[in-house]
Image (tube, helix red, strand yellow):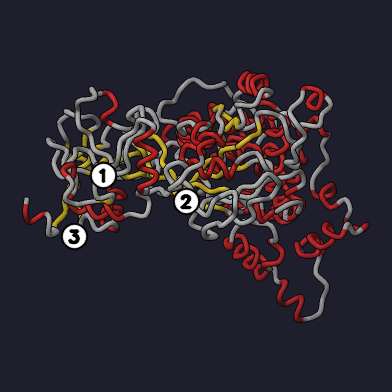
């Protein structure tokens, strides 16, 4: 049963396949040597498709009504519009967005995009074609950290670790994973509207604009090439590596000096006009198409079963991509509402036998637009050919699932970071470096596409003193920036974490800023409740016992009010004091 799910992104998908195998009675049929019906045997379908067996060459066509390329393209665009309407209501600012026919299907209260509440280990995935600069971006963002694959002893990396870099395609094979620091989304922190004299703490420091920095996992995966969903390049292995990302950053070669395979073709105008270089907008189109075909192919392999078992099975097919069931249904109902209003097709989810290839593409496009909202890192902006391409891209935004683009030069920003990692940086690199402001802004823009809820736990609602039980987190957590990253942060105009001892070059519980107001922050999923915050604090060892009551406030100076444990946390109650019936050692001293 597991082999029938080849290419699907999770063990859960294999569990579903096994359950379906037994429920269908296939075991009994096999035991009695009776042949299985071709439509019910996904492994046979898979094998025939893989081998291009003449008997099943048109497997997709007899399961799904064929659609023209024009209709598929139009349906992909319609799916993006549906996704945008969902994302619109999921954003706290609920800002002005493009109108969509699916908008009436949603209300702000029904969209959370994360599932059950709780702490959020936010992850940003880096995608793009080979040699676009993903690993360079990764090294600039993480200060050459890499938690998978060990250090790198290549000449290019000078033995300082980080993601391997080289001027040829597929330098990255296994994903590089490391912590980076991301400026908090605008409006998410209560200290933003106060003057600079107010001493707000921060466990991870602040950037040059005074924005609180949040720890985020960054994942750099192998480069995509056309046909990856069919197995080219790293194939489905690459695509499956993306499933734990919450948002994507497409690192694109904004100079147009490489082809779709990542091979450098030069930067002369003649080469670009001749088509040797790939236009960034074309890269955006085919890379998103790879993601669409990845999911689309997984669906069509099981479409006969989906038709027989209905919309519940259809929803379950999306469970392996890291999205919760509630949002899956929001997307399905949005598509159904769209079909009812535009194509006058009533109850389309109950009539899957009438769907064509365009309908499935529309659904997949909507799902990916919600599941993987995308920011663009328009890399290599320093090259002469980049300025026109950057202008072309920015004129089109939002386009093909991308919402915002940030021009940057990852190489120069990485060189700036390298100066604080190497003991003897090269003079040439020092002179051609620049602070990683573009990388930080791109990370900030990406997180803002799926904005978390920030909660500030305190021990006192007047002084906003931190919970002493969180001190261990503030000095020992693995996400805290290294000495090199802190030096880089200070050199670019930012400030150190409040418990960092600059003289001893370590985190110190005796540091004078230990009692800094609003020092700690919890990154929570939208829809989290006060009880979810309590459980997170309990797991961190900051609280013990059972929940008694909580006080909350939205802004500094606002009087705290009692709030029940089932109340959803947000900007109106983000400063939170939770009381329990068991005192920790630090609580007995209050």
Quick check: marks 2 and 1 in contact, CB under 8 Å? no
Q: Secondary structure at mark 3?
A: strand
Number of numbered callouts drawn: 3
Q: Is residue 283 visible?
A: yes
Q: Is residue 538 left or right of residue 156?
A: left
Residue 174 rendering spot, x and y as whole percentages: 61, 56
Mark nearer the N terminus (2 vs 1): 2
Residue 376 rendering spot, x and y as whole percentages: 58, 32
Spatial CA span between label 1 and label 3: 37 Å
Q: Mark 1, residues whose alpha carbon is within 10 Å: few (<14), some, or many (≥20)?
A: some
> Closer to the observer: label 3 or label 2?
2
Spatial CA span between label 3 and label 2: 37 Å
Q: Secondary structure at mark 2?
A: loop
Q: Secondary structure at mark 1?
A: loop
Residue named by callout 1:
502
Spatial CA span between label 2 and label 1: 21 Å
Q: Is residue 305 left or right of residue 208?
A: right
Q: Which mark is residue 145?
A: 2
Residue at 65 percent across and 40 percent down: it is 128
Residue named by callout 3:
545
Tell me the quarter of the image containing the N terminus. bottom right
Q: Which mark is residue 432?
A: none
Residue 159 rendering spot, x and y as whole percentages: 52, 55
């Amino acid at each position: 049963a597991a082999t029938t799910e080849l290419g699907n992104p999770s063990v859960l998908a294999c569990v579903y396949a096994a359950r379906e195998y037994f429920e269908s009675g296939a075991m009994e049929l096999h035991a009695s040597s009776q042949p299985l019906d071709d439509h019910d045997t996904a492994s046979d379908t898979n094998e025939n498709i893989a081998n291009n067996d003449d008997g099943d060459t048109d497997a997709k066509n007899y399961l799904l009504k064929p659609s023209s390329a024009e209709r598929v393209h139009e349906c992909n665009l319609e799916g993006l519009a549906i996704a945008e309407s969902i994302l619109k209501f999921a954003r706290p600012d609920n800002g002005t967005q493009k109108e969509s026919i699916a908008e009436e299907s949603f209300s702000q209260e029904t969209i959370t995009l994360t599932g059950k509440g709780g702490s959020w280990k936010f992850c940003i995935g880096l995608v793009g074609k080979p040699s676009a600069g993903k690993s360079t971006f990764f090294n600039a963002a993480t200060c050459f950290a890499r938690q998978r694959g060990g250090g790198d002893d290549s000449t290019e990396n000078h033995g300082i670790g980080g993601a391997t870099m080289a001027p040829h395609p597929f330098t990255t094979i296994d994903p590089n994973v490391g912590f980076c620091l991301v400026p908090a989304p605008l409006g998410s922190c209560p200290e933003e509207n106060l003057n600079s004299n107010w001493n707000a703490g921060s466990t991870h420091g602040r950037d040059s604009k005074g924005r609180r920095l949040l720890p985020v996992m960054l994942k750099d995966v192998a480069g995509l090439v056309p046909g990856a969903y069919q197995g080219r390049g790293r194939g489905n292995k690459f695509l499956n590596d993306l499933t734990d990302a919450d948002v994507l950053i497409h690192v694109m070669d904004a100079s147009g000096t490489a082809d779709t395979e990542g091979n450098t073709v030069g930067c002369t105008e003649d080469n670009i006009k001749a088509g040797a270089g790939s236009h960034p907008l074309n890269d955006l189109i085919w890379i998103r198409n790879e993601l669409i075909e990845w999911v689309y192919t997984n669906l069509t392999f099981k479409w006969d079963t989906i038709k027989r078992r209905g919309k519940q099975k259809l929803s379950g097919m999306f469970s392996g991509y890291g999205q919760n069931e509630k949002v899956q249904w929001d997307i399905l109902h949005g598509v159904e509402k769209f079909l009812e209003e535009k194509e006058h097709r009533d109850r389309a989810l109950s009539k899957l036998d009438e769907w064509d290839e365009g309908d499935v593409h529309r659904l997949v496009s909507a799902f990916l637009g919600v599941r993987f909202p995308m920011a663009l890192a328009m890399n290599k902006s320093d090259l002469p050919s980049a300025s026109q391409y950057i202008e072309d891209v920015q004129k089109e935004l939002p386009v093909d699932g991308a919402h915002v683009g940030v021009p940057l030069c990852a190489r120069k920003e990485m060189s700036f970071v390298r100066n604080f990692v190497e003991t003897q940086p090269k003079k040439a690199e020092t002179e051609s470096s620049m602070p990683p402001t573009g990388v930080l802004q791109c990370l900030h823009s990406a997180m803002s596409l799926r904005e978390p809820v920030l909660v500030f736990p305190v021990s006192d609602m007047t002084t906003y003193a931190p919970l002493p039980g969180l001190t261990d987190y503030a000095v020992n957590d693995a996400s805290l920036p290294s000495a090199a990253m802190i030096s880089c942060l200070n050199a670019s105009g930012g400030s150190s974490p409040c418990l960092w001892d600059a003289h001893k070059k370590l985190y110190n519980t005796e540091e004078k800023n230990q009692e800094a107001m609003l020092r700690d922050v919890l990154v929570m999923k939208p829809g989290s409740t006060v009880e979810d915050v309590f459980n997170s604090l309990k797991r961190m060892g900051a609280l013990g016992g059972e929940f008694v009551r909580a006080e909350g406030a939205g802004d500094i100076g606002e009087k705290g009010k009692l709030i029940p444990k089932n109340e959803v946390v947000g900007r109106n109650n983000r400063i939170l004091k939770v009381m329990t019936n068991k005192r920790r050692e630090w609580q007995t001293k209050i």
